[in-house]
Every structure is written in structure tokens, then in C-alpha cells.
Amino acid sequence: MRKYLALVLMLLAFYSCKQKNETTSEVNEEIVEAIKIYPSDVLPIVEECKILLGDGTSVKDLKSFQKEDFFYVKKEQGIDWVVYKAPNAGVTSKTSKNTRSELHQKKYWRPMQGGRLTGTLKVKNVSTTGDATVSSSYAVVIGQIHGDEGHKNEPLKIFYKKFPGHTKGSVFWNYEINHDGDNSGRWDFSTAVWGYDFSVVGETENSYPTEPKDGIALGEEFSYEVNIYQGVMYLTFTSKNHETKTFTKSLVQSEFADKASIPEQIKNTYFKRGRDGVEKESAYAGELQYFKQGAYNQANPKSTKSQVYDGDIDKQYQNGSYAEVWFKEGALSIGVQPKKDN
């Protein structure tokens, strides 16, 4: 922030000289424009990515780019946060029914090459409507690894989810198997970080499980690190008032290569939908991957039965039908050898 303060002082000194010939309002407008802070000024990750926004806006060069109501900077208690906001219904990508305001890493990598994604954030809103029996209701994805070859599945999706009426929500991560076949039998195995995992749902459309005691509230800050080193994914989750959690998952050697290894969680959820496949032994080895970060809203009018007000984005924002995530830190780098205690 020092560089911004120095810039402001320099501009004030410069423009004080111009006030003799210009009105105060004109000078103030020039100052505001000159010191405007963009997401690329706040987060190192931004200029290494392109973005798709919830209204369908797609931009490849994000230096000095922002868009009101979707991707912009908000200052709170002296800290600059980058806001990602996505309605329950808007314009989606070709391969998804869900809207997003989400960064897409430009540089691809393979698991043995590795890479690293970090983020410090707080979730400000998730959809307040949905079907409680559907796992993706009331949820937003805040970080991903996405495949770009083969089935283009997702080795990692980090979620935040909060049921209506609860103060605390859950943070969990999903691993999607890289199916050895036509991909129709694919499924996601979910692991809880704080609160519940993806499989915990309501018994009826409008009933909810007990609020998680160790959950994360809306507006509560937490961080994650996704470190891929020599084909292994190392995950670290930290929060001031919660126990630090770490996880390890190979991306090049499957744990789910035969029927006997399929977890009970999957048998109790996906099997009823006919999705009971196994993963190829090499998992995602050799396939191109990339990171994503932002707000990938999981609510929609079809599968989660979430309210969308006929697609009117303003009405959705006014009535809680959106996801909103704030990041104060977000960066990409090479994968690093983990510490021995990881």
C-alpha cells in the first residue's frame, strides 16, 4: 500500500497547481481515475490468467481490468480485496450449467511438472435458496485444478457451503476420478476440512443437517495452498480460529483402480445414479492441467432448484441469489518440495 500512498501524495501536489485554472470537481475526478486500483494491482495471480464472468464477459488480458458487480476491488479496514461475484443464473461456459466469475490459468502443466496455487479469502454470500437434498446447493467453488486433456475432469475442487439458517458453513475438497472408459461412471470423493463433506445433505428439500460446530462463518477469513510436487498434491488449509488441516493425494497413482477400493461414501451417493466406475491406475499422469480461482457458483435453477428471478441479475443480487467471494491474496508459482511433517 505504500506505493499507492506515495502516488496519492504526488498526485495531490501536482493537481494543487492545476486548481488555479480548473474547478475542484474536475480535479477530483482526475485524481480518482489516476489512483484507481484494479484487481491486477492487488493479486499477483490476475495477470497470469484470463477470466469468465457471470454475465458472459470473457477477457484474456486482465491488467487494469475490472467490471462492476462481477470482478472489482473493495477496500475494507484499509485492506484491498478482489471481489468475485456470480449470480445463480447468467451466462455459463459451454461445459457447465453454473455461472462463474473465475480466473483460468493461462499456462498449463502436467502433474510431474507440478505447480502451486495459494489464496486467502472470505466467502461473503452463497445462494440462500436450493434443494437441500442436492449436494451442490448453497455452495461455491473457490479453487480448482482442471484437466485439459482426456475427459477433462477435475482432480480438485475446493468448496464452501452453508445451509440456510446456519451461521457456520463447511469447507471441503473433492477429487474426481479420471475414469478408464467413457467417463459415464465418474464420481467425486469428498473430504471435509472444516464442517461437513459434499455427501452431507438434508433429508428433504427444505430440511437441513445440524450446523457444523467447527465450521467457517460467512465473512470469516481462511487460506489454502495447493502444491503439486512430482505428481503428488499437497493441500494445506489454515484459519485463525481453526486447526490447520493438511492432506496428500497422488495425481499419478490411483487409489480407486478396482471395485474393492471404491469408498462407502460413493456407494451411498453415486451408485444410485448408476455411476460406479473405477479410475485408471495412472490417474491424471501425463495430462495437461491448469488452476482456477474465484467464485464458481454451484446454484442453478435446474439441478439445485435455486431461485433466479427469470435470470434478472439485479434481482438475484437483491435477493441473495448469488455467490460472492473476496480474496486478499492469490498467487501462482512452481511446485515446491513439501516439508517433512506434511
Image (cartoon, grey):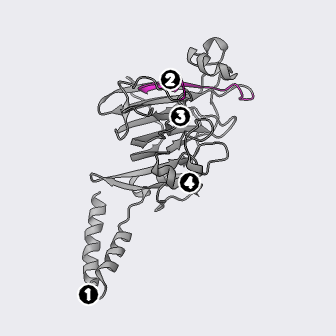
Q: Image point 47% across, 29% down: which residue?
A: 172
Task: Answer above or below: position of 287 versus 25.
Answer: above
For badge 1, the amino acid type reads Lys
Q: Which residues are magenta?
A: 182-205
Q: How many residues crowd around disc 1 within 10 Å: few (fewer than 14), some, or many (20 or more)? A: few
Disc 1 to disc 2, C-alpha distance = 66 Å
Question: Which quarter of the figure has residue 169?
Answer: top left
Q: Earlier in the sequence, mark 4 or mark 3?
A: 3
What residue type is disc 2 on?
Answer: Val
Image depth: mark 2 or mark 4 in front: 4
- In the rendered picture of this protein, how many numbered marks are placed on residues? 4
Residue tagged 1: 20
Question: Along the polypeptide, which appears first: circle 1 or circle 3?
Answer: 1
Does dot 3 land on a helix, a strand or a loop?
Answer: loop
Q: Who is closer to the viewer here, 9 or 274? A: 274
Which residue is identified by label 2?
200
Residue hosting label 4: 312
Identify the residue shown where x is 34% and y is 39%: 221
Report, in whole angstroms, how far the alpha carbon at label 4 lies from the one at label 1: 47 Å
Per the image, the residue denoted by label 3 is 137
Q: Is residue 75 left or right of residue 323?
A: left
Quadrant including the N terminus:
bottom left
Q: Residue 179: horizontal and vertical position, in percent?
A: 68, 26
Q: Which circle's residue, 1 or 2, is located before the other in the chain?
A: 1
Q: Please tell me whether mark 1 or mark 2 is closer to you in this view.
A: 2
Q: Nearer the viewer, mark 4 or mark 3?
A: 4
Which-is-in-front pick, marks 4 and 1?
Answer: 4
Is 175 located above or below residue 126 in the figure? above
**Residue 146, image x and y in percent?**
59, 38
